Image: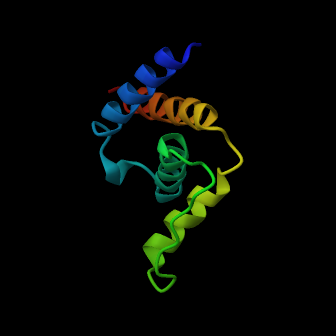
Amino acid sequence: MSNKDLNTLFDEAFANAQIVPQDSVPQDVQLVLYGLYKQASSESTNRIHYQNPQDLINAFKLNAWMQVKHLTADEAKEKYIEIINSLLKERNL
């Protein structure tokens, strides 16, 4: 798959993610999607912006991103697309 195709599919998946009701997606899946999105869209895949460790929500987000740091941006895009397509299919959207 060419980068242009992958980028187009990723953009479509991101737009489709807005269709899926957030409360219907388990929080652990939401965190995985967050991490994959950050990894896929990060210009520098080695830079992580550390936020206040006292902020529990941001700590979970940071952890989700750290879990996928081993992926390339393209791999993260592919996984993100797979999960969004699966969610759409499960919910018949």
Q: Is residue 39 above or below residue 53?
A: above
Relative image position of residue 67 (x, y in whole percent): 66, 56
Q: Residue at x 45, y 34 (%)?
A: 84
Relative image position of residue 11 (x, y in whole percent): 38, 29
Q: Residue at x 44, y 81 (%)?
A: 55
Tell me the quadrant of the picture where the C terminus can be found: top left
Q: Is residue 29 left or right of residue 69?
A: left
Relative image position of residue 71 (x, y in whole percent): 68, 42
Q: Is residue 91 above or below residue 63?
A: above
| Quadrant of the image occupied by residue 77 | top right
Q: Is residue 63 above or below residue 85?
A: below
Q: Is residue 38 left or right of residue 91?
A: right
Q: Is residue 20 left or right of residue 76?
A: left
Q: Residue at x 54, y 65 (%)?
A: 62
Tell me the quadrant of the picture where the N terminus can be found: top right
Scheme of colours in the image:
rainbow
